[in-house]
Image (cartoon, rainbow, N blue to C red):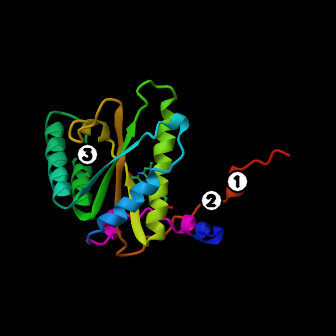
Amino acid sequence: MNSKLLNETIKNRRATPPRFLAKKEVPKETIQQLLENANWAPNHKKTEPWRFKVYTGETKQKLANKIYSFLIEKIKSGETINPQKAEKFKTNLERVPVAIAIILQRDLAERIPEWEEIAAVSMAVQNMWLTATEMGLGAFWATQQFMPLLHEILELKHGQKALGFFYIGEIALDYPSPGRGNITDKVQWIE
Ligand SMILES: Cc1cc2nc3c(=O)[nH]c(=O)nc-3n(C[C@H](O)[C@H](O)[C@H](O)COP(=O)(O)O)c2cc1C
């Protein structure tokens, strides 16, 4: 990849909301390539703290139903969850062709701070996101306030935390870029 292409890919990467993704299957090999690139993210002490659970088709539908009924029960028992958000989450899971649970696996000996491992997982996600962009696919990282409640449903193991879902699909409609403020406002050259 030449640097001009990389510059373009970085700028063209968009958070494409689920409703802007096409309801069309993504080939398994494509998902595998994204995951392979995720696996090359930098990480401290070789902890490789990223874990992913890939849901498509029927398993995704089952997950959507399970999470939705679980959240409704939680709401009934007084948990402060916005019912509209629960509904939207279900609709989004149903709509997107691929939903990948982004999971942090803490180093069990906790040799490095958690933030470094979250940083490594985020870099793995960015690798997937840029690869998806290169392939002309749309992607979206969705985080939910109720994510910590999903520990059991996602069958997380000791030291694991869910950091949201990564949605992938073909782009049905381009989502406009929110743009960025000027980099010069964020940089101080110490000369
Ligand atoms: C860790 C993380 C979590 C995010 N969670 C959400 C989310 O829950 N809902 C949402 O609308 N966007 C979410 N986003 C995407 C941002 O809204 C998006 O990146 C931002 O609007 C900039 O758009 P762009 O990425 O297309 O340039 C998340 C992004 C990151 C990095």
Q: Which residue is mark 1?
A: 185
What residue lies at 49% left-to-right and 55% top-to-bottom? 126
In the orientation shown, which residue stands out farthest toward the bottom? 173
The part of the image, by quadrant, that contains residue 180 is bottom right
Q: Position of residue 131 (x, y in %)?
A: 47, 63
Tag 2 near tag 3, CB within 8 Å: no
Q: Position of residue 187 (x, y in %)?
A: 72, 50
Q: Which residue is mark 2?
A: 181
Q: Secondary structure at mark 1?
A: helix
Q: Which residues are magenta?
A: 9-23
Q: Position of residue 98 (x, y in %)?
A: 29, 61
Q: Nearer the viewer, residue 118 or 188?
A: 118
Report if residue 176 lies within the magenta region. no
- Mark 1 or 3: in front is 1
Mark 2 neighbour density, 10 Å: few (under 14) some (14–19) many (20 or more): few
Tag 2 near tag 1, CB within 8 Å: yes
